[in-house]
Amino acid sequence: MVEIKKCTLKELKFQQYDYLLEMYVPLHIAADHSQLQLTLVSRYRGLEETYYVFELSRSEEICIFGSKIERKELDHLMLHDDIWDVYLTKEKITELDTEEDEETEEPLRYRLMSNLKHIELLYYINHKENKILLPYSTNKGNLSFQVKNPGIIAKVERASIDKSGLISLSGFAVDPTGKDQIEKRTFILRNSGQGIELKYPVQFIERADLTEEYGHHGLDFNHAGFYAEIKAEDIALLGEGKVRYKSYLKMDVDGEVKETPRLKLIPDSSFSRVEKYIKKFDGRKKKFVVTRTKKKKFLSISVDDYRFSTHVKSLLKKKLRKIKKSKYTKRAYQLAFKIIGMLPADKKLVMFESFLGKQYSDNPRAIYEYMKENLHGYKLYWSIDKRFIYNFENRNLVYIKRFSIKWLFAMARARYWVTNSRMPLWIPKPAHTIYLQTWHGTPLKKLAADMEEVHMPGTTTEKYKRNFLKEASNWDYLISPNAYSTEIFRRAFQFNKEMLETGYPRNDFLFTNNNAEEIRAFKAKYGLPEDKKVILYAPTWRDNQFYGKGRYKFDLPLDLDKLREKLGDQYIIVVRMHYLVASSLDLTPYAGFTYDFSNHEDIRELYLIADLLITDYSSVFFDYANLRRPMIFFVYDIDDYRDNLRGFYFDFEKNAPGPLVKTTDEVIREIQKLDVNGYQLPETFEAFYKRFCYLESGKSSQKVVERVFLGRKEI
């Protein structure tokens, strides 16, 4: 037998109503097994629950351990909607044996990998609370348990296209509430952006194999199988351009129609990563692709025009991407940047960039718009990430794709750089360039040199701080929104050049455009109902939840079903994720109630239309406070965030300009209070406003431009 290198789940099963976990444990961890514990860690609230671990068998090659979670303990885990990540933990053994040493030593943690394909079918239901404890495999293959309201569990296991263009799909769908009188199922293909929805009948397939493998707790999955067919000709000529379809199942359960979340493709056997079919329809050659997405493994069906030249270009682009990532290419680019940077500066050229080129937004946008209106003769260019080009098109902007040859010449010769986040460290700043760093928020959470520990991927605490401070040493000007921020920026960024304490340019918009006409126009433009109040949900990112370097994930902790049930008659929710969050929200089941504006160009318009802000530790609340409207702080993981991830610069719990809540039920209660009693500024608000918002007056952009570009001393 091959040596087990990671702690891996062997089996999860029920003993009556208790969970029994059997686990493979590597030999080096299995030593001193009396110290092992099974530990469940709350992802949102920072809580831990531990369970006794016992040895089942041991050989020279492998060890198997067990642990039991009793029914009453399962019910305890389900008190709040949450995600519990599963670890095996082991106390460190040190030469010292003192009480003080025991208190300071952190246990060793080993993430438990999942080894069961359809582990979700081993769910536990608490019928009294109407909650499900759903075991699942994370994107990295680890075991976690999710607590939520019960919903249909469905997956596609087989997906193929044959030579005639017939797309065959099969899998299973289960209603965990125990209502097994499923009268009808319908397979749905949907492209919401182009308003396409197609429905296909579904055949029932016997699945005795699922009952045999996962029916330990007395459930019968024989009825769960389904099979659907889609003809290529049905979807060949629909929509414009490349049409990508998401897949769902609708099920009629005891007369109630339910829709699954977006279907995932989890193959039950070897699956060629991409299934393709090419054929002419009405003289147009079309390419059909059935595959699954890389991150979350969703089933994806797409239709696009096919040209051989486009196919060749696609192959070449893949090769070029590999070449671009080469360290030798980066060195050559850096050398070229240095050489071009020695040429005379273009004294009227200003390069703007917002959030790594992803957005036309924030402080750089406000400065750009003021300069365009009031300072003529300058060449104002935008540095953009080509993946987000749609944010810059049809705006009468001059933009250049990041890291292109044209970008290299423009950046190296520009007299001014204006950006709100760090530039790549390997890009050398020319001696003739004035670098205006606008930054992007009043700090609540600790920054740079003030951070005790960094949890971000691809770096260490020491390396992160060193690189941050090295890039900050290139800044010539740094904008500060208030004296509080100035003190922190000086220390955290070790910035000793000119600080522009002007208020934030981006907030000028909140003073000049805060009127009913602007708000109505925005709602009409984006199809938001005028008769509903708007809740803006804008959380920040978590350093320790990520897919990879610079790509963070975020599991939506709000219970949207409950919010829609209690508030849907009067409210809609607009969701705005942080720019570093790479997760893609699927809000299709909540259409008409919840709207994803994460990719909207600028949050400033969302502030104006929002009657209420829900956030956590994001700096958005400092800006929104200028409007003097209600704020609720949904801080489900505050203990972990404050004590382990970032830490705060002031007593947030005492001085926040609104109530702090930890559950969806508490959020609903606070909103219902506003509906009954109306909104009154909290006692903490005036002191908060005088400390953080006193410089905001609608003139910040003017002050910055007059100092940096016109050289005026008094601002």
Image (cartoon, rainbow, N blue to C red):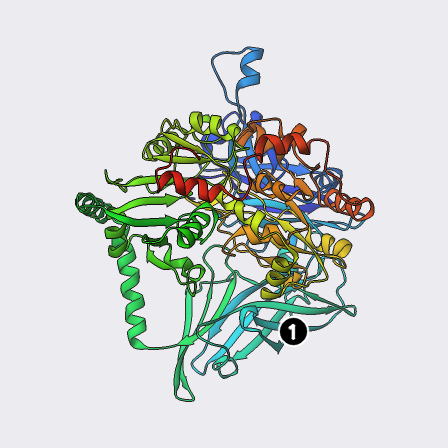
Q: Give coordinates of residue 677: x percent, y percent.
A: 82, 44
Q: Give coordinates of residue 631: x percent, y percent.
A: 67, 42
| Residue 82 quadrant | top right
Seen in the picture, residue 468 relative to 370 is either above or below; the reply is: above
Question: Which quarter shows the N terminus?
Answer: top left
User: Residue at 79% of width from left, 44% of height from top?
Assistant: 673
User: Residue at 48% of width from left, 16% of height from top?
Assistant: 94
Between 508 and 479, the one lying in front of the other is 508
Residue 231 is left or right of residue 3, and the answer is right
Q: Amino acid at mark 1?
A: Thr
Give the tally of numbered discs: 1
On the question of residue 52 being in view, the answer is no
Q: Which residue is mark 1?
A: 186
Question: Which quarter shows the C terminus?
Answer: top left
The residue carrying pointer 1 sits among few (fewer than 14), some (14 to 19) or many (20 or more) residues within 10 Å by Cα, namely: some
Q: Secondary structure at mark 1?
A: strand
User: Residue at 37% of width from left, 36% of height from top?
Assistant: 712
Between 489 and 143, the one lying in front of the other is 489
On the question of residue 504 being in view, the answer is yes
| Residue 334 quadrant | top left
Between 383 and 249, the one lying in front of the other is 383
Q: Give coordinates of residue 615: x percent, y percent.
A: 62, 43
Residue 708 is left or right of residue 432, and the answer is right
Q: Give coordinates of residue 299: x percent, y percent.
A: 52, 65
User: Residue at 30% of width from left, 76% of height from top?
Assistant: 308
Residue 383 is left or right of residue 555, and the answer is left
Residue 146 is left or right of residue 570, and the answer is left
